[in-house]
Amino acid sequence: MIRVFVTVLTVILCWSHLHAQPKEQRDIEEAARSGNWSKVESLATTALKRTPNDVSTLYILTLSQLRLGKYERALGLLQRLRTLDSVRIQPWLMISECEIALNRTPAAISTLTLARMRFPDSVQISWALGMALARSGRYEEAIDPLEDVMYKRPDVPSITDQLARCYHATGRFSESAELFRIVVERSPSNAQAWLKLGESLLALRKLDSARQAFDVVIQLQPDSAPAYLAVTAIVSEQGNLDSARAIAQQLTRRRPNDPQGWYNYGLLSMSAKRADSAITHFRNAIRLQPTYPEAYFNLALAYEDQGFLEDAAVALRRCALSSSLLAPDAYNSLAIVYRREGRFDDALSAHAQALALRDTSAIFHASRLNTYFDATRCEQASGLIEQARKRFPESNEILYASARCYIRTGRSDDARAIEQLLATRAPALAEQLRLMMK
């Protein structure tokens, strides 16, 4: 916007030689050069009373109001300017800037869209429209005007970078990787571009190339958490958990107060069957971020792995309180913990909480049936079994849980029918049922 203002100001001051009275012109020029925009506004307002439709005076008055943050007033003047000076793009651009400053981004986008229709060859209009759309998260719509600008101005780094980000945000990773490569070739020290290049390559499953890009990020920004996290994910996926844990440890040493680093270290420790270490790492993450639902959830899994069921239950309850998104899974897992402890009433209560939040989960319904089975209360679950089978006829978990209860309640023919159905759909579950029926 500042570039537009400077251009407009230059035009105005030149144009004022033809329109303004000499002393008035000198006063306005002096006030503008000294940055006294209140005085510029006052002088231009006075001049405008004599010549209300003088375009040059309207421009300088509008400019002063923009510099003073009087966007609402400036917007009214710019509407007049757009009518009086209809052949120029400046009023359209300045109107959109006012609308953005007034938090009316949709209106700014509409203004720029109309301007692009009126001035289809204007690079500035397409540039402004593309950037406004991108900043509003409308990446797909931003691509067309930004491609237009890049075709006409391929030498502008900011356009290449923004278009690459739009490609990345819309899943066009081949295009984003290509453009981010251009960005880093032009600016090898641009760590953010290297990071986005790595993310694009990672999405394309080019793990070695992605790793190289993330390594450059770490060289440029040794404390870059996103780069470390990405590298640990790549190394872990390549099957080297020890190296992944070592890299994760480096991040926690460089950023000891980063909860995500400790959480990542905990996840990798769980993958390496080091639940004891994972407990320490998850607790460090929670110490730094007491409302970290994912850390609570995985801490509970680590506690459960180590047999600390009461601690697992506490962590799951805190997870449920910390996140409405994870609460259903936390309550279902809590029910399983209670089931393992033999606290079946508490388990059924936790199942009810999980299902109240996510009744559409076949897994949750099957889990509740399994609790009835372990509690030897299958007779009480007969109605729930039939309801679950009607709602989720394709769920192998529901069929398996139902068959177990059928076996326990003497409905062997029904259990055998399910076993035969699962023989092709889920052979391992069918084999377990056959062993139960012997």
Image (tube, rainbow, N blue to C red):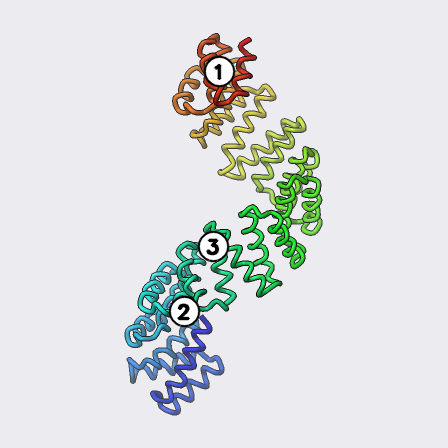
- The Cα–Cα distance between marks 2 and 3, rounded to whole angstroms, is 20 Å
Identify the mark nearer the N-term, 3 or 1: 3
Image location (x, y in percent) of residue 190: 59, 62
Query: Which residue is under mark 3?
Result: 167
Residue 374 visible somewhere in the drawing:
no
User: Where's the C terminus, which quadrant?
Assistant: top right
Residue closest to the eye, 62 or 386: 386
Discs 2, 3 touching: Cβ within 8 Å: no
Q: Secondary structure at mark 2?
A: helix
Discs 2, 1 touching: Cβ within 8 Å: no
Left/right of residue 243 with respect to residue 301 in the rendered view: right
User: Where's the N terminus, which quadrant?
Assistant: bottom left
Q: Secondary structure at mark 3?
A: helix
Q: Residues within 10 Å of mark 2 (few under 14, many from 20)?
A: some
- The circle on residue 123 is 2
Q: Residue at x 45, y 83 (%)?
A: 31
Amino acid type shown at disc 2: Val
Query: Which residue is under mark 1?
Result: 419
Q: Residues within 10 Å of mark 3 (few under 14, many from 20)?
A: many
Discs 3, 1 touching: Cβ within 8 Å: no
Amino acid type shown at disc 1: Glu
- The Cα–Cα distance between marks 3 and 1, rounded to whole angstroms, is 49 Å
Q: Secondary structure at mark 1?
A: helix
Image location (x, y in percent) of residue 124: 41, 69
- The Cα–Cα distance between marks 2 and 1, rounded to whole angstroms, is 68 Å
Q: Residues within 10 Å of mark 1 (few under 14, many from 20)?
A: many
Q: Quadrant of residue 81?
A: bottom left
Identify the mark nearer the N-term, 2 or 3: 2
Residue closest to the eye, 199 or 201: 201
Amino acid type shown at disc 3: Tyr
Count of marks, rendered view: 3
Left/right of residue 64 with respect to residue 408 in the rendered view: left
